[in-house]
Image (tube, helix red, strand yellow):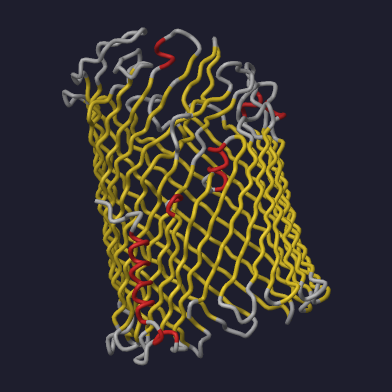
Amino acid sequence: MRIFSNNIFLTFSIGLTIIVLRAGPSLAEDPKTSFETSVTNRCVDVKGDVAKFRAHSWVKDGCVQGGKIFFDQESSDGTLMTFDGSITPRDNDQDIDFLLSNDKWGNVHIAYDMFKKYYDISGGYYYPFTTLRSNDLENLDLGLNIGNLMFEFNPNFENFHDINFTYERKIKDGRKSRLTWTPVTEGALTRNIGPVWQDIDETVDIFSVKGATTVAGFDVKAKQQWEFFEAYAVREEKNLSTNATASEKKRRRQEQEPITKSMTTALSGEKWYNNENSFVSSAYRFAKLNNNEREKIVESNEAGVPTTFSNPKQILPSYAANKLDSHTWVGHYMTKPTQKLKLSGKVKTEYLKKEGYSHYNLDAAPNSAGGSTPNGIMDSQDNNFSNNSVFNVGENLSLDYNISNDMTFFTEAELGQLRNHIREEQKNINNVLNWERETVAKTTKGIGVVGVRYVPTHKFSTTTYVRHRLENNDYDDKADTVLGVNSAFIDSMRLNSDELATKFTLKLTQWFQTGFRYQHTRNLYILRVENQDSALSRMKSHTFTYDILFQPIESVLTNLSFSRQTFSATTPAASKSTVKIPGFNADVNSWILSNSYAPFQELTFSNVFYYSFADNFNDYTSSGLPLAVSNAHYTVDFNANWAPKNKKWSIEPHYTYYNYQGTSVSEFGDYSASAVWFTFKYDWI
């Protein structure tokens, strides 16, 4: 059932307008009442790839109209009513916020918003291809309507002021692109660059009750929440090929219907004492989740006729169910033994229990390399069972010490230990065991931070810190009937990470200040697979950011920001004896320049210039892998606002120019676009 409608805002706002206008002079004479309306006209002209422009800007091409209403009134008995809403019907963009409150009985809050997110219809890009270099979903307008409705009631009881009842519904409805692209074959070469889309119809209903009170000096809070999730999703994958081979042009359609019910209970208490120098808190959370899902997969030939090829994936209606219970407890203690020293400690424990079951019904025969019509009869059934228990403990200690009035030393250490016990087995349609596995996964991790804040004057401040992270994952297979075939093929994985960051702000005068931020990160990933030596991968990045604020006179303000990020990654694939996959080096540079000018109080001009470019394809030119980008993107925005003194109206013209250019080896889909807005606002009261 859909409680959202494109007309919900229009009906509500028209009704409110009639009430306000019929009230007539009585509202106009009330200084505690205000009523404003505005209308907006926007036209966008796109030259080039319209779908990519929509995906980048979330703006639809063509002309659209929209409106906004604001109403605010405070009555003599202290009741406050506020309504703020806007609508752009063609974009399916709506936003409503309504509040009715009184100190005697509490408040009612209703909020509703809906917007549309657009997606690119193109898949990947492989420049050595001639015919299928680029592919897109020409007949699909990919867009996802995302909406949320919230109703909140806060009654004001005499001795219990913080109780709250909330109902919330969230929806997603439409189609979006996916990044798991399909195989595209040209001659003897295949690349996964074919676009994939998914149709989504999703609703979430959330009910919650929460309250707060004071018990023995502790501020106690409690919350009970129920959540119901339901969705229907259809995913379609289409293989492409220039060859006559039917299996290279097959289609796959996957239907999923998940239903999830969850319940969460949370209790917490906190207290300041010792003259507000010490703080203690504790919280407990219990969560219970039940999930069921139905799934079906149909493979067909190019014409959409169900066809079974070699290695078939024809899945008849199948079913899965999962249950999860979790218990989480957190404790926190903070104290200031002296004016210069602050100590803090946290402890977290979590126990999670999960049980899962699924059966997959496979229609495998008849099948052939050229394709055969499936008979709709279940040929085999995979019955999977899993049992999972997780125990997680974490500790955190932090210290802040004021070395002097202008310098503070801080340090923090965080530790974690996790034990995950997994039992899995699969049986066939005759209840005969196919395989079973029992794995104990252990994770230990630690994070340490040391830093200094230095503020010698109000004109200069700086912060520098170093962070080290260590994580060790060990996977111990207690039992595995089919070694090397199933998912438990990793024996261990370790991560070493170092980060250095510094920033400073310099305020030379009231009209000029600047800032600089630098961050360096280095990660080492050490992976060991069954019966093989350890493999080492590296990642490094440097990020530089400069900011300048310049205000030579009161009416002029300029902000300039420049950011440069360099990134490199190498893996063992670079040393393969056959096809060497090079390391990846990426540089991204971005500029943002904004200006505002107010020649007098009634008139303001502003503009923003954004430019970003990346040229990261050279590493992959030799191998032809479509795994890097090379493009330039800039936006220029101009805005003005004129609100004449002693007038009830104002106007706001707005112009934006967009430009996106890719290189001939990295992608297709360049565009340029011009967008013009014009908003007229009138203050009725």
Residue 410 in percent (x, y) is at 65, 70
Q: Quadrant of residue 659?
A: top right
Task: Tell me if 152 is positioned left or right of 475 in this view.
Answer: left
Q: Is residue 592 above or below residue 249?
A: below
Q: Nearer the viewer, residue 407 or 462?
A: 462
Is 326 positioned to the left or the right of 576 in the image?
left
Q: Is residue 305 left or right of 633 when viewed as pictured?
A: left
In the rendered view, tell whether residue 585 sits above or below residue 559: above
- Residue at point 64% right, 46% down? 674
Residues 268 and 204: in front is 204
Query: Residue drawn 68% across and 78% down?
Result: 402
Residue at the left extreme of this rendering:
430
In the image, residue 43 lies at what x, y percent? Answer: 56, 49
Q: Is residue 134 left or right of residue 599?
A: left
Report the number of discs: 0
Q: Looking at this view, is 626 or 223 the one in front? A: 626
Give the image location of residue 205, x and y in percent.
28, 57
Q: Residue at x 63, y 60 (%)?
A: 653
Q: Depth check: 81 or 15 in front?
A: 15
| Image position of 195 with respect to 286: above or below | above
Residue 354 x, y percent position in the rendering: 29, 47
